[in-house]
Image (tube, rainbow, N blue to C red):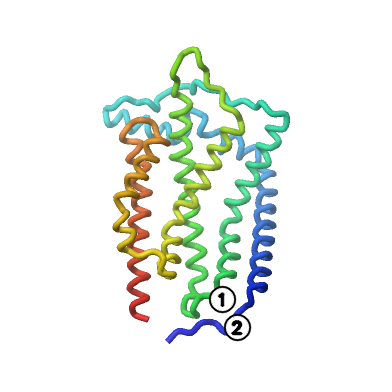
Amino acid sequence: MTTKPKGEMSFLEHLEELRWLLVRSTIAILVAALGAFFISDFIIEQVIFGPAKTDFITYQFFCELSQKMGVEADFCIKEFPFKIQNTNMGGQFSFLIWICFIAGFILAFPFVLWEIWKFIKPALYKTEQKYAVGFIVTTSLLFFMGVLFGYYLIVPLSIHFFGTFNISNTISNEFNLESYIGMIKTSVIACGLLFELPIIVYFLSKLGLVTPSFLRKYRKYAAVIILILAAIITPPDVLSQIIVTIPIMIIYEASIFISVFVEKRAAKI
């Protein structure tokens, strides 16, 4: 028979704990951002502007894959027909700050998770509190996998599509620096959080807000939404859409299995 930890906190005490969670997490992100500042040249040239170069690993992979499959190699181009420009007085400074902050958030994510775990720990059973390390490692790995998925797939596919898309030869693509970093920021962070779906489903299932039958019932709707998103963010070819869709659908299916596990475990208690 499991029992909850003794000593319940008042509402104000919970607010105080939450405040310190936010303070410590913010400090960790700022420290990591400061570290990123010292290698900002590498981050900007090799990481941020890497997908804007035709020799980026993703384009080479799709080019070789297209050639082996005997289909039109849209990714085999020598130069992107667009430029990235800055039109604001403090645009490049803001760009640098955002780059360091995003890098700091990604690097400090495991520490933020640890702070979140300490916050929710009193509400867990003693048998569940021992899984702290597994929770941090699993959640961090899923987040980093999502970040890599967004960076190596979503970002280059988006840049390739919008960078080569042209409705008239009289129009030239000159992307604003803020628009460019905004696209990378949104894609990478959103994918990182999307890959946390199994963890979110786990806690929602424990609260009884999500059930396996609910996830199975809306599986086809989820598949349609994922396919639509894949069609929007990828070039207009089936291969790219499939490569983006498959990992996301695998995550959704894994979430169903996790919900089943939680439901069966709850039934035994």
In the picture, measured across the screen, residue 122 lies left or right of residue 31, that is left
Total marks shown come to: 2
Which residue does the image show at 37% across and 45% down from the upper left? 226
In the depicted structure, whether residue 119 falls above or below residue 230: below
| Residue 9 position within the rendered picture, expressed as x and y whole percent measured from the top left | 62, 78
The front one of 137 and 263 is 263
Depicted 264 relative to depicted 69: above or below: below
Asked if the residue under mark 2 is in contact with the one under mark 1, i.e. CB atoms within 8 Å, the reply is yes
Q: Is residue 133 above or below residue 96?
A: below
Q: Amino acid at mark 1?
A: Pro
Of all residues, the one furthest to the right in this rendering is: 89
Quadrant location, the C terminus: bottom left
Q: Return the x and y of residue 75 as percentages of the image width and height.
A: 40, 27
| Residue 140: image location, x then y, percent | 51, 58
Residue labelled with disc 2: 7
Residue extending farthest to the bottom is 1
Q: Nearer the viewer, residue 47 or 208?
A: 208
Residue that badge 1 annotates: 122
* Mark 1: secondary structure: helix
